[in-house]
C-alpha cells in the first residue's frame, strides 16, 4: 500500500510547527526579559526587539547590592528546603504505616487525609492565618515552613504509601527475626528502598514551596523573612522608574529555579508524570 | 552509611525541636540586646528596638525626608532607643496594619491606616494609646499644634487618638513653564476657572504637548487630585469636600459632571499610557518632559532635581501653583501617627520619644524646607524662606495671593475601598467609553454602599 | 514487653505528626471556614451567627460574585478544552519521538518551575503598551494604531489573563505521555496487522487508553483555575471594573477588609465547586481506582 507523499509532508510540517510553537511560548518570555535586562532604559523604550548595544552586569550588581537579594534567595532555599525535609520525614513515617500495616480505621484516616487534595489551598487562608498568629509564628520562617510542609500532606502520603506498598514484607519479617527494632526496620531497611518515591515527593514539595506566593504574602511582613516570589512585588514598586533593573531582578528571581530544574530535569518530569499532580 | 543516616535523623529531629522551640518567639517589636558581642557589664541597660514597617522607605517619595529623620532620631538616642524601618509597598500598608491589629501584633508606631478600620475598630474600640496626658505634659509642643487637628483627634471621652499636626501641606500642581510659554499661556492657573483651564489644555495640545500626567493604576492618585479640585468648583462640591463624614452616593449632578470631566481629560489630554499607569509612570512622564502638568503634593519637589529620575535641568523649568478656582487640597481632619494600646512600657516610651522628636521645631522646619507645607503657629527661622526650594516658595506664594478655599481631596471623603482600589479599577472603563459618566457613578455608588456600616 | 502493644504504640507514634498536621492545617481550617461562613465576623469581635446573610450578600451586594462565577465557568471551559487539548496534542506528537522531542519536553516544563508570581509580572510587561512585545509587534507589522491596554480594557483583560496560562499545559502532556508509553507494544502490532493506519491507531486505540490520564489533566487544570490568584492579583487586580474578578481575589479582599464571615462563605463555595468538579469529571471519564 502506497500513501501519497503530500499528507505525510503536511503531517511532519504540522508536528514541527507545534513543537517550535511550544518551545517558543515556553522560553520566549523569559529570554526576552533576560535580553532586555542588558539594555538601557532608553533602548527598552525605543524598541523592545532590538539587541542590547553593550553587555553590562551593572543592573545585576545594583539589584544584588541594594535589595537584600541574597537574603531573599537564602530565605527561599531555607524555607522550601526545610519544609520539604520536615514534610518528607513526617509523611514517610505515616506512608510506611499506611503502606505496610493494618489497623482499625486505617482506610478512613487515609481517605480523610488525601481528600484534602481537593480543597483549594487559598480557601483555608483566613483560618491558617489565625492559627499561625496564635502560635506566635506570624512573620517567621518557621511559620511558613510549617504551613508549606502541611501542604504536601495529601500528595506525599499518596506517593509514599504506594512506594512502601511495593517493598516486600518478607524483608521486615527477616529483620524482625534478626532482632531489629520497629524503628530500625523502618529506617535501615524500608527507607533506603523507598528512595525513588521519596525523591518524587520531595521534588514536588520543593517546587511547590519554592514558588508559593499567596501564603508567603499574608504570613510574613519583614524583609528578613521575605521569599523571592514576594520580593518581586517589592521590586515592581521600587524599580518602576527603571525597567533595566526590574528585568534584572526578575531574571535573578527566576534563574535559580530554572537552573535547579535543568540539573534534575529527568527526575522532575518523571515525578510530575508518575503522579499526575501539580506541585 | 549508617552513621550518615543517623546524622540525618538527628538533623530532622533537631529541626522539629527548633520548630517547637521557635513557637514561643514573637515576630514583631522585641527588646533586643544590641551589644551582644560585649560583656553584660559593659552596657547593663538594654536598647529598646522598635521594628516599624513603613512605606516611606526604599524608592518611595516619602523616604527622602523620613529615613534621614529616623537616622537622626537613632543617633540622638543611641544606646537607648532604636527604630528600624521595614520596607513595605505603600499599596499594602493599610491592609498589613489591619491584619496585624487583629492579632494584637501591631508595631509601636503607625501612621494613619485604613480609614474605616481606624474609625470602627481602633477609635471605637479604644485600641490606641491615649496621648492626652503626654501632650498636656509638653506645653511647648502643644502650643504649636493646629487647633482643628487637636479637636479632630479628641474623642468624646476626651482621649487623643493620634499626634495632632503642627504643619500641613496644601496640595497643588506642577507645570512645565517652558511648555506653557510655547503654548502661549500667560494667565496663572490659580486664577483660571475650569473653562479657562480646559482652553489652556487645548492650546498645550495644539502646541504639540501632552497636557496632563494622569493615571488609573494603584489609587489613581494624580487623576483623583485633579478631579477633587474640579468638584470643589462645582456648586455644592466644596461643602461636600469639607465634610468629616464619608460620602457613599455619587449620583448627584456635581459628581456626574466631575466624572464627565475626567473622561474628557483621559480621552483628549493625557498620555497613551495613562490607563493602567501607576504613580511612577505618571511621575515619569512629567519628570521627563513628556507632559506639561502633574497634580501632586509638595513632597514631589525633591524629585525635580534628582537626575536619576528627572531630565537634566527640569527643576529650572517647573512652576508650582494651586488649582483653578483658587482651590488647594489639604486635610487636617485625618488621623496621623498613633501608638497602639498595650505595648510594653519601654516601647511606649520609645514611640513617644519619636513622636516628640518629629514635633521639635527644628525637625518641623527641616521637613517644611524639604517637603513643603505651612505651619500656622510655628515661628520659622529668619533664613527659612531662603533655604526653601524656589518651587516650594512659588507654591507658598500662590497660596498667599490666590487661595480662595482649601478642601479635602476625594481620597479623604471616599471610603477606603473606593479611594484605594475601586476608583482606579473602574476608571479605564470610563476613559474608554465602556461606561458613561452616569453608569460609572452608579457602579461606584453600588460599590460604596457595601462599605457603608 | 508485649510485642503487639509495642507495635501499636509505634504505629501511633508514626502517625501522630501527620495527624497533627492534618488537624491543624486541614480539618480545623475547613471546619472554621464552613462554620464562620454563617456568621458576621470581623476578626476583632467574636463571630455572630447570621444565617444565610453572607450567601445572600454574595449575590446581592453587586455583581462581583456572579462575575467571578461566570469567569470561573469560562476559564474552566477553556482549561478543559483548549488548554488540555493543546497538552494532549503535544503529548501525542512527542509520543512519536520526532527529532528534538526531548528538548520540547524539557523546555515545556520551564514555565511551571518558575513562580506564578514572576510569570504574571513577566506577562504584565509582555502586554505593556509602551515596551511590550505584543503591541509593538502589531504596530511593526502595520497596525500603527494598535494600543490595546491589555489588562485594563474590556474584554482584552480577560483574554490577556487567559493567555498567561493557556498554552502552559505541560502537566497534562507529561501525564498523558507517561500513560501512552505504558501501552504495550503488542496492542499496536496487533492493530497494524489488522490493517489499521496510523491515524486509526491514534484515534481508536491510544486515545481511549489514555482517557483516564486526560481526565486527571482536566481535573488538575480546572482546580488550578479555581485557585488562580497571582495571574489576576498581580495584573488586572480584577479590573477593569469587575471584569476579571474571581473567587480567590474576593477571598483575599474579604480578609483584607476584615469581612471574615463573608470571605469564608466565598471559600465554602470554592470548596464545594472543587469537590463537584472532581466528582463530575471522574464520572465523565469513568475514572475509578485512582484517588482523584
Image (cartoon, rainbow, N blue to C red):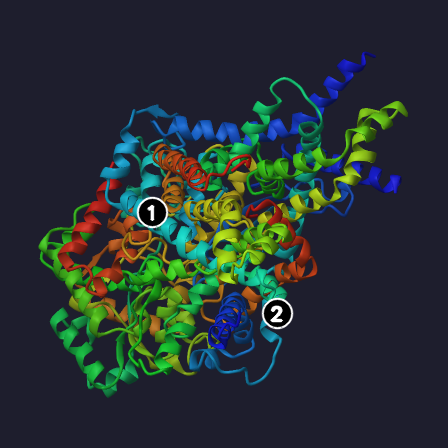
Q: Up-down: is C198 above or below C186?
A: below
Decide: marks 1, 2 in contact (CB < 8 A)? no
Say if residue B419 shows up in the picture.
yes
Q: Position of residue B95 (x, y in %)?
A: 41, 45
Say if residue A230 shows up in the picture.
no
Q: Position of residue A113 (x, y in %)?
A: 56, 30
Q: Secondary structure at mark 2?
A: loop
- Tell me: B379 left or right of B235: right
Marks 1 and 2 sit apart, C-alpha to C-alpha, by: 37 Å
Which badge, 1 or 2, is on the more N-terminal residue? 1
Q: Name the residue carrying label 2.
A: C100
Instruction: Give the camera-side residue of B434 and A223.
Output: B434
Q: Name the residue carrying label 1.
A: C73
Q: Up-down: is A237 above or below B294?
A: above
- Tell me: A214 left or right of B231: right
Q: Position of residue B342 (x, y in %)?
A: 49, 32
- Tell me: A243 left or right of B32: left
Q: Up-down: is C137 above or below C42?
A: below
Label placed on residue B293: none
- Quadrant containing the N terminus of chain C in the rendered view: top right
Amino acid at each position: 500500500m502506497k500513501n501519497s507523499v503530500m499528507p505525510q509532508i503536511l503531517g511532519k510540517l504540522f508536528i514541527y510547527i507545534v513543537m517550535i510553537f511550544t518551545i517558543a511560548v515556553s522560553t520566549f518570555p523569559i529570554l526576552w526579559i533576560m535580553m532586555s535586562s542588558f539594555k538601557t532604559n532608553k533602548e527598552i523604550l525605543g524598541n523592545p526587539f532590538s539587541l542590547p548595544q553593550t553587555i553590562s552586569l551593572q543592573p545585576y550588581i545594583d539589584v544584588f547590592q541594594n535589595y537584600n537579594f541574597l537574603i531573599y534567595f537564602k530565605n527561599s532555599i531555607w524555607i522550601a528546603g526545610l519544609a520539604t525535609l520536615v514534610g518528607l520525614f513526617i509523611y514517610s513515617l505515616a506512608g510506611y504505616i499506611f503502606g505496610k500495616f493494618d489497623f482499625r480505621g486505617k482506610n478512613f484516616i487515609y481517605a480523610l487525609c488525601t481528600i484534602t487534595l481537593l480543597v483549594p489551598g487559598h480557601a483555608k487562608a483566613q483560618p491558617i492565618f489565625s492559627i499561625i498568629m496564635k502560635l506566635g509564628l506570624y512573620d517567621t520562617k518557621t511559620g511558613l515552613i510549617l504551613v508549606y510542609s502541611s501542604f504536601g500532606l495529601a500528595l506525599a502520603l499518596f506517593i509514599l504509601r504506594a512506594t512502601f506498598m511495593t517493598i516486600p514484607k518478607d524483608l521486615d519479617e527477616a529483620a524482625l527475626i534478626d532482632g531489629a527494632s520497629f524503628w530500625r526496620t523502618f529506617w535501615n531497611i524500608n527507607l533506603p528502598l523507598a528512595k525513588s518515591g521519596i525523591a518524587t515527593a520531595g521534588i514536588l514539595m520543593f517546587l511547590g514551596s519554592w514558588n508559593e506566593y499567596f501564603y508567603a504574602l499574608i504570613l510574613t511582613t519583614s524583609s528578613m523573612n521575605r521569599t523571592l516570589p514576594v520580593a518581586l512585588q517589592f521590586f515592581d514598586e521600587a524599580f518602576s522608574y527603571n525597567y533595566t533593573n526590574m528585568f534584572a531582578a526578575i531574571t535573578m528571581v527566576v534563574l535559580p529555579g530554572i537552573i535547579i530544574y535543568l540539573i534534575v530535569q529527568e527526575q522532575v518530569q518523571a515525578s510530575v508524570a508518575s503522579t499526575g499532580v501539580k506541585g | 552509611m549508617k552513621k550518615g543516616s543517623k546524622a540525618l535523623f538527628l538533623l530532622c529531629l533537631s529541626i522539629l525541636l527548633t520548630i517547637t522551640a521557635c513557637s514561643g518567639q514573637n515576630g514583631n517589636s522585641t527588646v533586643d540586646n544590641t551589644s551582644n558581642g560585649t560583656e553584660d557589664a559593659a552596657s547593663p541597660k538594654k536598647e529598646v528596638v522598635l521594628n516599624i514597617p513603613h512605606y516611606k522607605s526604599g524608592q518611595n517619595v516619602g523616604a527622602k525626608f523620613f529615613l534621614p529623620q529616623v537616622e537622626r532620631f537613632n543617633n540622638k538616642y543611641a544606646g537607648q532607643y532604636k527604630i528600624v524601618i521595614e520596607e513595605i509597598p505603600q499599596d499594602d500598608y493599610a491592609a498589613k496594619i489591619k491584619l496585624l491589629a487583629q492579632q494584637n501584633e501591631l508595631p509601636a508606631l503607625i501612621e494613619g491606616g485604613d480609614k474605616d478600620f481606624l474609625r470602627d475598630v481602633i477609635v471605637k474600640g479604644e485600641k490606641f494609646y491615649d496621648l492626652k496626658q503626654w501632650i498636656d505634659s509638653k506645653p511647648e509642643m502643644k502650643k504649636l499644634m493646629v487647633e482643628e487637628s487637636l479637636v479632630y483627634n479628641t474623642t468624646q471621652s476626651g482621649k487623643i487618638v493620634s499626634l495632632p499636626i503642627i504643619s500641613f501641606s496644601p496640595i497643588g500642581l506642577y507645570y512645565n513653564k517652558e511648555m506653557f510659554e510655547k503654548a502661549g499661556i500667560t494667565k496663572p492657573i490659580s486664577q483660571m476657572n475650569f473653562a479657562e483651564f480646559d482652553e489652556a489644555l487645548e492650546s498645550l495640545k495644539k502646541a504639540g504637548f501632552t497636557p496632563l500626567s494622569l493615571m488609573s493604576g494603584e489609587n489613581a492618585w494624580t487623576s483623583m487630585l485633579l478631579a477633587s479640585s474640579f468638584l470643589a468648583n462645582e456648586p455644592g462640591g466644596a461643602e461636600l469636600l469639607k465634610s468629616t463624614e464619608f460620602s457613599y452616593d455619587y449620583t448627584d449632578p456635581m459628581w456626574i459632571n466631575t466624572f464627565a470631566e475626567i473622561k474628557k481629560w483621559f480621552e483628549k489630554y493625557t498620555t497613551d499610557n495613562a490607563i493602567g499607569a501607576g504613580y511612577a509612570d505618571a511621575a515619569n512622564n512629567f519628570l521627563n518632559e513628556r507632559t506639561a502638568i502633574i497634580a501632586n503634593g509638595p513632597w514631589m519637589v525633591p524629585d525635580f532635581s534628582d537626575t536619576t529620575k528627572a531630565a537634566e535641568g527640569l527643576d529650572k523649568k517647573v512652576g508650582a501653583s494651586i488649582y483653578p478656582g483658587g482651590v488647594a487640597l489639604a486635610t487636617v481632619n485625618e488621623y496621623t501617627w498613633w501608638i497602639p494600646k498595650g505595648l510594653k512600657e519601654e516601647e511606649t516610651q520609645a514611640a513617644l520619644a519619636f513622636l516628640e522628636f518629629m514635633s521639635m521645631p527644628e525637625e518641623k522646619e527641616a521637613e517644611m524646607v524639604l517637603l513643603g507645607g505651612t505651619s500656622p503657629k510655628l515661628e520659622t527661622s529668619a533664613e527659612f524662606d531662603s533655604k526653601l526650594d524656589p518651587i516650594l516658595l512659588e507654591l507658598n506664594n500662590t497660596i498667599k495671593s490666590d487661595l480662595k478655599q482649601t478642601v479635602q481631596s476625594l481620597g479623604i471623603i471616599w471610603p477606603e475601598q473606593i479611594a484605594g482600589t475601586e476608583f482606579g479599577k473602574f476608571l479605564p472603563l470610563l476613559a474608554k467609553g465602556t461606561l458613561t459618566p452616569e453608569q460609572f457613578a452608579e457602579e461606584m455608588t453600588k460599590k460604596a454602599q457595601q462599605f457603608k456600616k | 514487653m508485649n510485642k503487639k502493644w509495642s507495635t501499636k504504640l509505634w504505629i501511633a507514634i508514626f502517625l501522630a505528626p501527620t495527624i497533627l498536621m492534618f488537624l491543624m492545617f486541614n480539618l480545623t481550617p475547613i471546619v472554621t471556614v464552613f462554620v464562620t461562613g454563617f456568621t458576621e465576623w470581623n476578626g476583632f469581635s467574636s463571630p455572630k451567627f447570621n444565617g444565610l446573610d453572607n450567601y445572600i450578600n454574595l449575590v446581592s451586594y453587586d455583581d462581583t460574585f456572579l462575575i467571578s462565577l461566570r469567569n470561573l465557568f469560562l476559564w474552566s471551559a477553556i482549561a478543559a478544552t483548549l488548554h488540555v487539548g493543546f497538552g494532549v496534542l503535544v503529548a501525542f506528537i512527542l509520543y512519536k519521538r520526532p527529532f528534538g522531542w526531548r528538548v520540547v519536553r524539557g523546555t515545556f516544563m520551564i514555565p511551571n518551575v518558575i513562580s506564578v508570581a514572576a510569570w504574571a509580572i513577566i506577562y504584565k510587561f509582555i502586554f505593556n503598551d509602551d515596551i511590550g512585545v505584543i503591541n509593538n509587534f502589531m504596530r511593526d507589522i502595520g497596525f500603527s494604531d494598535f494600543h490595546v491596554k491589555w489588562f485594563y480594557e474590556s474584554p482584552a483583560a480577560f483574554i490577556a489573563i487567559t493567555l498567561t496560562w493557556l498554552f502552559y499545559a505541560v502537566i497534562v502532556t507529561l501525564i498523558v505521555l507517561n500513560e501512552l508509553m505504558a501501552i504495550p507494544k503488542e496492542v499496536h502490532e496487533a492493530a497494524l496487522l489488522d490493517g489499521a493506519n496510523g491515524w486509526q491507531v491514534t484515534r481508536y486505540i491510544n486515545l481511549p487508553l489514555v482517557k483516564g490520564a486526560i481526565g486527571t489533566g482536566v481535573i488538575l487544570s480546572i482546580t488550578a483555575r479555581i485557585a488562580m490568584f497571582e495571574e489576576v492579583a498581580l495584573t488586572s487586580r480584577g479590573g477593569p471594573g469587575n471584569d476579571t474578578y474571581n473567587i480567590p481575589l474576593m477571598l483575599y479582599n474579604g480578609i483584607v477588609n476584615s469581612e471574615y464571615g463573608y470571605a469564608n462563605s466565598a471559600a465554602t463555595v470554592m470548596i464545594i465547586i472543587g469537590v463537584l468538579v472532581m466528582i463530575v469529571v471522574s464520572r465523565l471519564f469513568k475514572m475509578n481506582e485512582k484517588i482523584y
